[in-house]
Image (spheres, rainbow, N blue to C red):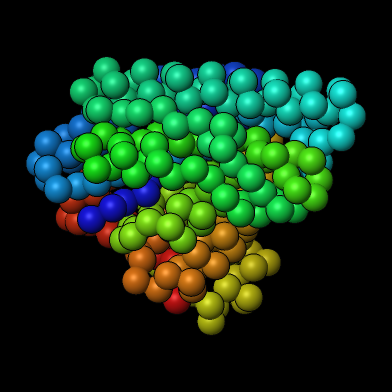
Amino acid sequence: MLTLVKLGGSLITDKRVEKSFRRDVVKRLADEFASACAEDPQLKLIIGHGSGSFGHFAAKRANTINGVSTPTDWRSFAYVSNVAAELNYLVCECLQAAGLPVWRIQPSASLLSHNGDVVSMSMRSIESALSNSLIPVVYGDVSLDSVIGGTIISTEKLFFYLTSVLSVERVFLLGEVSGVYDSSGVVIDSVNGGNFGTLFSVISGSGGIDVTGGMETKVADMLSMVLRSPQMTIRIFSGLKENLLHDTLLGLVHPGTLISK
């Protein structure tokens, strides 16, 4: 069973304060990953994470998501990639300390996009990692783009591509919130093709700087993914509740918001 898990930027950093890493949160989640893997040796994972207050601050200043053309743009493009990689190093440091066999995979080394949509990425490292019981760790990163020169690719868009080339059964998105909220602040149990249009106006966005869009964008991306691959289970839930990740990985609980066809 291959599961893609995203640790949201708002979960692992304070998105209101530049380069603020929540090490305590990531260490706890790393322990939960390790415990679940020990209890279920058949569990296969790809872990992804957002750029949070590392990449998003830099990308916002340079407006990188809307294209790269001038020498100044390209310097900023490279800087955004570098600070995203800084956060990836910190995350993997915690995962490795928990005993997880993680392999840092830099998406921008092979990502190509067309007007913001991923068209290709080398899969050799990821496939080799999975076949040798390693855990690939990817993250939101920059991409060369055939239309606008360069842009930002969110972890959700990266997951969208991965699910098109790998047999993925589950996708979990962890953030600070317990799921997708309605206008009353109540978690919506399920979002699907039939009710998304109605819910569109009441799904709140990000609580900090996020150049790739807030909750609304994430839900839309995930809905597109599951409509294409209806065998998948996609859930949005909190990464702040102790042991919830562990229990969800093992199928003991089904928290948050389910996104389905």
Classify the position of the N terminus by image quarter.
bottom left
Position of residue 89 measured from the top left corner of the image (x, y, whole percent): 45, 20
Q: Residue at x 66, y 39 (%)?
A: 143
| Residue plotted at (45% across, 76% down) | 261
| Residue 174 appears in the picture as rendered | no
Residue 195 horizontal side relative to residue 101, left or right: right
For this orientation, the residue located farthest to the bottom is 194
Residue nearest the observer in this picture, 23 or 242? 23
Q: Is residue 209 above or below residue 258?
A: above
Residue at x-position 27% and y-position 18%:
97
Position of residue 243 relative to residue 85, above or below, is below
Q: Residue lying farthest right?
A: 70
Number of marks in picture: 0
**Residue at x 73% of width, y 28% of height:** 77
Of residues 82 and 201, the one nearer the viewer is 82
Q: Is residue 117 left or right of residue 13?
A: right
Residue 23: name its quadrant.
top left
Q: Quadrant of residue 33?
A: top left
Foreground: 15 or 213? Answer: 213
> Please, is residue 200 above or below residue 156 in the view?
below
Q: Position of residue 145 (x, y in %)?
A: 73, 45
In percent of width and height, residue 169 lies at: 31, 61
Give coordinates of residue 133: x percent, y percent.
21, 37
Above or below, 4 against 202 in this view is above
Q: Is residue 23 visible?
A: yes
216 relative position to 232: left or right: right
